[in-house]
Image (tube, rainbow, N blue to C red):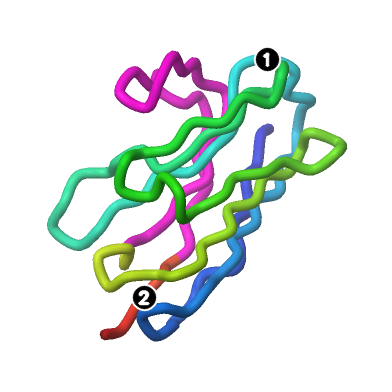
């Protein structure tokens, strides 16, 4: 059984930083991608960032490109999201996801597995 466990969310002031972590267990993920999605109150879930297992290519939503950085652990069972310079509009529940295809930030497949999410609140 695949499990994705997120950590690192919290309350931070605008301009502050957080680092989200996601640990995957239950199987070895050698294909496709692992990444982050988020859902703000009253909005649909949206793609944030992803990293391909093969080659390590990274993809970012326009709203976070140049600010957030996604990286993976050496064992390929962990992914991280470094979030500096946070803005109130980054407030959302952030979900880790794995096992999805991605061509670009506008063409993201449906993940096979999801974590339960971690709340990020950015105060102004």
Q: Residues within 10 Å of mark 2 (few under 14, many from 20)?
A: many
Callout 1–callout 2 Cβ contact below 8 Å: no
Q: Which residues are magenta?
A: 92-118
Residue at image mark 2: 121
Q: Position of residue 112 (x, y in %)?
A: 50, 24
Q: Does residue 30 lie above or below 6 as drawn? A: above
Residue at image point 52% right, 34% down: 50
Q: CA distance from mark 1 to mark 2?
A: 32 Å
Which of the 4 image quarters holds residue 44? Answer: top left
Q: Quadrant of the C terminus?
A: bottom left
Determine which of the numbered discs, if any, sits on residue 31 in the image. 1
Q: Secondary structure at mark 1?
A: loop
Residue at image point 19% right, 62% down: 41
Q: In this rendering, would 68 be left or right of 44?
A: right
State the residue lying farthest toward the right: 75
Q: Secondary structure at mark 2?
A: strand
Q: Could you say which is closer to the camera, residue 64 or residue 81?
A: 64
Q: Earlier in the sequence, mark 1 or mark 2?
A: 1
Q: Position of residue 104 (x, y in %)?
A: 40, 20
Q: In this rendering, would 124 be left or right of 102?
A: left
Count the marks.
2
């Amino acid at each position: 059984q695949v499990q994705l466990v997120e950590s690192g969310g919290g309350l931070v002031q605008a301009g502050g930083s957080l680092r989200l972590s996601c640990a995957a267990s239950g199987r070895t993920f050698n294909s496709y991608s692992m990444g982050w999605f988020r859902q703000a109150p009253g909005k649909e879930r949206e793609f944030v960032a992803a990293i391909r297992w093969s080659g390590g290519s990274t993809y970012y939503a326009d709203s976070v490109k140049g600010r957030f950085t996604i990286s993976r652990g050496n064992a390929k069972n962990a992914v991280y999201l470094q979030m500096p310079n946070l803005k109130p509009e980054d407030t959302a529940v952030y979900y880790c996801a794995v096992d999805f295809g991605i061509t670009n930030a506008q063409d993201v497949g449906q993940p096979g597995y999801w974590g339960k999410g971690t709340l990020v609140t950015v105060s102004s």
